[in-house]
Amino acid sequence: MLTSTSKYITLATVVYLVAFFAFASGLVNSIIEGARSRQFIVESRSIQTVGETIVIVMILFMGMFGAYLLYNSGKAATPKNQWAYLGSGFIVLTIALMVAFFIVKIKTGV
């Protein structure tokens, strides 16, 4: 059972990761530049909307979760669990990369 100290540490870790990923995905640019736009994704590399920032944060969390699944595949006890973690980790990472490249494609207008 989690103690109250570890609950606070877990909460602080989650808040830190959300803030870090939000700033890494362009939160400041979306607040300054993207507030004037009415589109969800603007076809410009210099302007970013708040919706794009939210999607990019979700992509970063998906990538982190995929990497965590790959990490767990090395700690699994049975080969069946190892392959399950390994396969699901690569699938989650592949989906995150595909969504990210799709957004880049839209942003560059190609």
Image (cartoon, grey):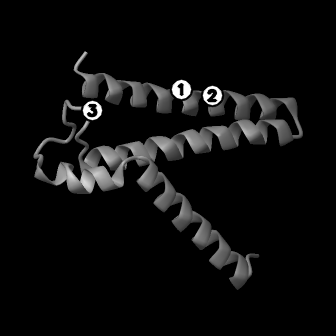
Query: Is mark 1 in CB contact (under 8 Å) with mark 2?
Result: yes
Q: Amino acid at mark 1?
A: Thr
Q: Is residue 30 above or below residue 109?
A: below
Tag 3 or tag 1, which sits nearer the N-term?
A: 3
Residue 71 is left or right of residue 96, and the answer is right
- The image position of residue 21, as x and y in percent, is 48, 52
Q: Amino acid at mark 3?
A: Arg
Residue matched to label 3:
45
- The image position of residue 13, as x and y in percent, is 61, 66
- Residue 83: quarter of image: top right
- Residue 39: quarter of image: top left
Q: Is residue 77 above or below residue 5?
A: above
Indicate the secondary structure of the residue bearing disc 1. Answer: helix
Q: Amino acid at mark 2?
A: Phe
Crowdedness near tag 1: few (<14), some (14–19) or many (≥20) residues, C-alpha within 10 Å: some
The disc label shown at residue 94, or none: 1
Q: Is residue 97 above or below residue 36?
A: above
- Residue 104: quarter of image: top left
- At x 40%, y 30%, the residue is 99
Mark 2 vs mark 3, CA separation in Å: 28 Å
Q: How many marks?
A: 3
Tag 3 or tag 2, which sits nearer the N-term?
A: 3
Foreground pick, 82 / 66: 66
Residue 50 is left or right of residue 6, and the answer is left
Residue matched to label 2:
90
Mark 1 vs mark 3, CA separation in Å: 23 Å
Query: Is mark 2 in CB contact (under 8 Å) with mark 3?
Result: no
